[in-house]
Image (cartoon, helix red, strand yellow):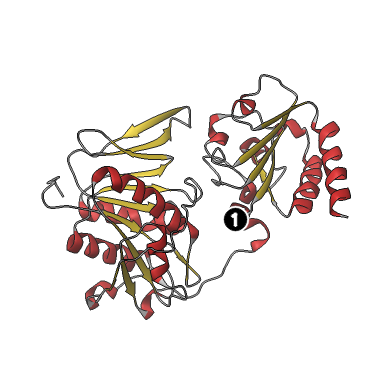
Amino acid sequence: MLRDKSCVDGILVCGEIRQNKIHSVTKELLGKAREIAGKMATRVTCLLICGQLDDMPEELFCFGAERVIVASHDKLEYFNQEITAKILSYVVEKYLPEVILAPATTSGRTYLPSVAAMLHTGLTADCTSLDIEDGSGLLLQTRPAIGGNVMATIKTPNHVPQMATVRPKTFRMPEKHVDGNGEIIFLDIPPSLLESRIEVIGKEYASETVSNVQDKDVIVSGGKGLRKAENFNMLHELAELLGGGVGASRPTVEAKWIGYPHQIGLSGRVVSPKCYFAIGISGAIQHLAGMQTAQKIIAINKDPEAPIFQIADVALCGDFKDIVPVLINRIRREVI
């Protein structure tokens, strides 16, 4: 749609539902939406498209939503790109939001481009920063470009809604406000929106052994400074003692030292743990974009000029083979 400020209002956050529960990325996006809504003097709405929902939608009021729209139907038990895109387009045409924020997850990356095409507007994917431009009120959508070597800020000045996707863990979880309240709307879905050429024959969930590194409070990551694949065993040992997960830089994955599900960075997973160990990682911008929101960053590197030290809270300059075993032994003594 062509931009007409008088006809649109509000920010719409597309919630992520996994196994009938509201995923944490929904709350992360609501926190950011609430922040930019304050600059736009507008309100925040969250849309939940789902089959069965085990969580209470009222919980989202505590994280920044002022209105929650629930679009629930048995045909949405499994994710269906075609139906989801049609429902979101219908909601946009009905409520006319000025901005749409959605998670850059597997499902989000699948249906959001279709919605942008249906609405004749633009879509900026994998944003690392969102803000509002003074004066114009336009959404400033910042994302890495040219292989992560530059950061581009994109605007959609002529069309609405302005659409952006954000990877999970890009923004920190907002504080929960127990006095949150708002309006819940249970959407009456027109039957035509539930028609689909896609037939879902089943669903299989990925193993949790490596797929949940994003959910860990502690992540121990290794780079090419480890020198060989076998040295990841030391990182696995440290991560296990700390109850965390193991991450890796892109070069180590490309060298087949460790599997892709462990990759942290622009071309892998974005994480925001309480503590992030960067061991033998130089700190390329592509990697930093995937972990820079960690609450505490501990870097171990032989190179005193390594870029990772510029963002580290604790910088240990030395050979990881001299430092990590000491950490492991000290933690083991404390645990015992």
The answer to whether residue 51 is above or below residue 241 is below
For residue 157, which quarter of the picture?
top left
Q: Quadrant of the C terminus?
A: bottom right
Q: Position of residue 80 (x, y in %)?
A: 38, 68
* Left or right position of 104 against 296: left
Q: Check disc 1: other Cα within 10 Å, few if <14, some if 14-19, many if 20+.
A: some
Residue 21 in sight in this render = yes
Residue at the far bottom in the pictured view? 74
Circle 1: residue type: Asp
The answer to whether residue 132 is above or below residue 115 is above
Circle 1: element type: helix
Name the residue at 35% across, 78% down: 73
* Left or right position of 283 against 194: right
Q: Nearer the viewer, residue 158 or 172?
A: 172
Q: Position of residue 334 (x, y in %)?
A: 85, 50
Residue at the far top in the pictured view? 305
Q: Position of residue 285 (x, y in %)?
A: 54, 30
Q: Which residue is mark 1?
A: 215
